[in-house]
Amino acid sequence: MSADLDVLEGVLGHRFANRELLERALTHKSCASERNPEEPSTDNEQLEFLGDAILGFVVSQTLVARHPTYPEGRLSKLKAHLVSASHLHQVALVAQLGTHLILGRGEEMSGGREKKALLANALEAVIAALYLDGGLEPASNFIVKHVVGEEAAPDEAAQVTDYKSALQEMAQALKLPQPRYTTVDERGPEHAKTFMVEVRVGRDWVSQAEGFSKKSAGQMAAQLILQQLADWDR
């Protein structure tokens, strides 16, 4: 698993001195329960609790710094979106966190690597692991870059989570052909299959992304095209 953790550490932007912290953050209770029940808890639930608090603090601090003139209600609305399970789920998908989770057999068979709550909770646990291993700086750097984003817009309460619909609307607005999605590859056993989906907008715009379902792969591919079109239309 060390090679996999090397990849994840690259995404997180932090090399762990204590990798056991990262492994625990990735361990769901379904796996921990299959081990010796007399051993101390080794799942990520306590880390999730801590990570939730760190996430809330860093998001609040970042929003206040970026938007010093916003009233409390507007900041609260922004924060509620950024710390929501739906948004954290999208962040976890983009980071491919599901590929690194340590699950029990039952959770694995039921598609746990893509479950919204499970991925959102694991992301919070990973944030706690970053904090415990390296202090606030690596945790804050990850949150600002991946959760808040480099360019938080003023009204992020309606921030995009359905990238396929957003791409369709942008293509119409720019008078471009409608997006076309194609599954170009399928790999792995039936219980843990991954899909590579390609999206094309006309001849000039193309992107591919991988996920544990065609839907999630299509969403990620659409997100990449959206960013390309946004940069092109500036």
Image (cartoon, rainbow, N blue to C red):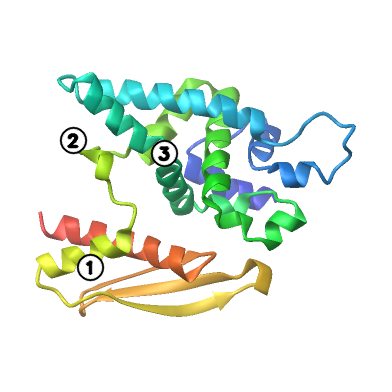
Q: Is residue 98 shown above or below 130?
A: below
Residue name at image x 59 percent, y 32 percent = 48
Of all residues, the one furthest to the front in this rendering is 73
Q: Earlier in the sequence, mark 3 or mark 2?
A: 3
Give residue 187's position: percent from left, percent from top: 59, 74
Give residue 17's position: percent from left, percent from top: 64, 30
How far is the residue under mark 2 from the one under mark 1? 23 Å
- Look at mark 3 in the image and give the residue it sits on: 84
- Look at mark 2 in the image and give the residue it sits on: 154
Give residue 210's position: percent from left, percent from top: 48, 66
In the image, taking residue 174 as reference, residue 39 lies left or right, namely right
Closer-to-camera residue (129/34): 34
Residue 234 appears in the rendering: yes
Classify mark 1: residues with Cα within 10 Å, few (<14), some (14-19) or many (20+): some
Label 3 secondary element: loop
In the image, taking residue 157 as reference, residue 141 lies left or right, namely right
> Residue 168 bears which disc, if any?
1
Residue name at image x 10 percent, y 54 percent = 234
Q: Amino acid at mark 1?
A: Gln
Label 1 secondary element: helix
User: Residue 40, located in which quarter of the rendered image?
Assistant: top right
